[in-house]
Amino acid sequence: MTEPKLNLVGGQWVAGDATPNINPSDTSDIVGHYARATADQARDAIAAAKAAFPAWSRTTPLERHAILRRASDEILARKEELGRLLSREEGKTLAEGIGETVRAAQIFDYFAGECLRPEGELLPSVRPGVGVEITREAVGVVGIITPWNFPIAIPAWKIAPALCHGNTIVFKPADLVPGCAWALVDILHRAGLPDGVLNLVMGRGSVVGKAIVESPDVAALTFTGSQPTGAALAVQSAHLMRKAQMEMGGKNPFVVLADANLDVAADCVINGAFFSTGQRCTASSRIIVEEAIHDQFVAKLADQMSTLRVGHALSEDTQIGPVVDENQLAQNETYIEIGKSEGARLVGGGYRVERDTKGFFQMPALFADCTNDMRIAREEIFGPVASVIPVRDYDTALAVANDTEFGLSAGIATTSLKYATHFKRNAEAGMVMVNLPTAGVDFHVPFGGRKASSYGPREQGRYAAEFFTTVKTAYTAA
Ligand code: ADP
């Protein structure tokens, strides 16, 4: 067994039950052993973060800037190694793993800059002889709970703004991907964070996550993960009157109009639905196609899908890595059976494939002849499975796109300015894409959705300040 990587509590690396981190491309490959924290260690971590808060929240912008900058530089310098670690533990391709690592570095770079751009307003009062100041202050201890599908980017886009705005942190990564989380915390610790400012508690949601969520000392909770868990944590947070930010599922529509450039549209669908093995909350899962081009477009998709190379995440020619684990693969297969039993036509894919190593390989699946009331069109599958829904015209396409409990990302392929403009205005989603895949976003602009997809203020960019700070209005008599 390799030397286990430990949890960081109050600046000390503390031991716990060592658990193997398994490579989904090759289950004989153990990425490393990682200590699971206990609920008591999580409580110690919260106490350490609380103790560190007064001093950290009063550090100068330059002190915080320097630490985030150093972290960004190290992540970037180690992008190949960290990208490889990411692909090994999560299963996305090496190009995607390195790309995500670079994104994490860019996020720390961005928030290093934000440290130097603190905002405030100085206003005259409506009363004579009074001045008004509006400032933003840190919130306190932030609980950060992250999912397995973006093992470094999602921790980065929660940790960087939390630190930038002067908060202290208790961070629980997903149990399946402790490797990138540990590496990121190690980098930040060595970059000069004072003890207790950033605490790492790896382990199960039901133990470590629960201890974080139940603590009244956690002043704000930011979560990304499944819809039912996020909804439950939002309710628990409301009981404690704490700030909550929940990024949950999606059932993202991608509309293809008859006037679209079908090469562009097909690339958007293949990328949006299947890259990163479809394991993105912004993945396109409902492909809404105008009848006039339906058959031609489905044939084109089937053709392109037949050339997709599914395999070991670290093999150079792999385009789609494995599913993350056996549970997720079994869930994908269950939905394939549900789709068939509902009367959808499986155009291709959906079956397991064997490669040189034992992993969770599945060919991307496309269903045609779907209706929007089928379960495969309503429930988030979180795998490489997409459903094509034929529609009469644009108005029906928009109505179907919006007929979902979710509202994260919505896309359209069209060459019509009129329809593109109308769709941008009327899609009930937090993010709208025109002639671009539903997945794939920038780091300097807001990320988030509507309806059951998101709860609380947006993440990323300047909008992150809304969650990671609290506003104070101060009046002074002259
Ligand atoms: P997924 O594993 O599909 O990404 P989950 O919602 O199950 O989605 O998990 C997202 C994160 O939330 C993980 O870090 C998980 O350990 C954590 N988690 C799961 N259940 C709870 C819970 N009841 N309380 C706190 N955290 C939880």
Image (spheres, rainbow, N blue to C red):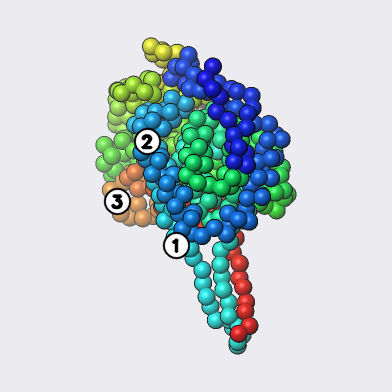
The amino acid sitting under disc 1 is Arg
Please report contact status of discs 2 and 3: CB closer than 8 Å, yes or no.
no
Compared across the picture, whether 259 is left or right of 440 comes to: left
Label of residue 79 in the image:
2
Q: Residue at x 44, y 52 (%)?
A: 66
Q: Quadrant of residue 171?
A: top right
- Who comes first in sequence, dot 2 or dot 3? 2
At numbered mark 3, what does the secondary structure look like: helix, strand or loop? Answer: loop
Q: Is residue 349 above or below residue 389?
A: above
Q: CA distance from mark 2 to mark 3?
A: 40 Å
Most foreground residue, 240 or 408: 240
- Who comes first in sequence, dot 1 or dot 3? 1
Most foreground residue, 217 or 343: 217
- Does any portion of residue 348 appear in the rendered image? no
Q: Residue at x 56, y 70 (%)?
A: 134
In front of the other: label 2 or label 3? 2
Q: Residue at x 47, y 39 (%)?
A: 187
Quarter the N terminus occupies: top right
- Percent across and percent down for residue 137 are 58, 61
The residue that mark 3 highlights is 416
Most foreground residue, 361 or 202: 202
The amino acid sitting under disc 2 is Lys
Q: CA distance from mark 1 to mark 2?
A: 27 Å
The residue that mark 1 highlights is 117
Quarter the C terminus occupies: bottom right
Mark 1 residue crowding within 10 angstroms, few (<14) / some (14–19) / many (20+): few
Mark 2 residue crowding within 10 angstroms, few (<14) / some (14–19) / many (20+): many
At numbered mark 1, what does the secondary structure look like: helix, strand or loop? Answer: loop
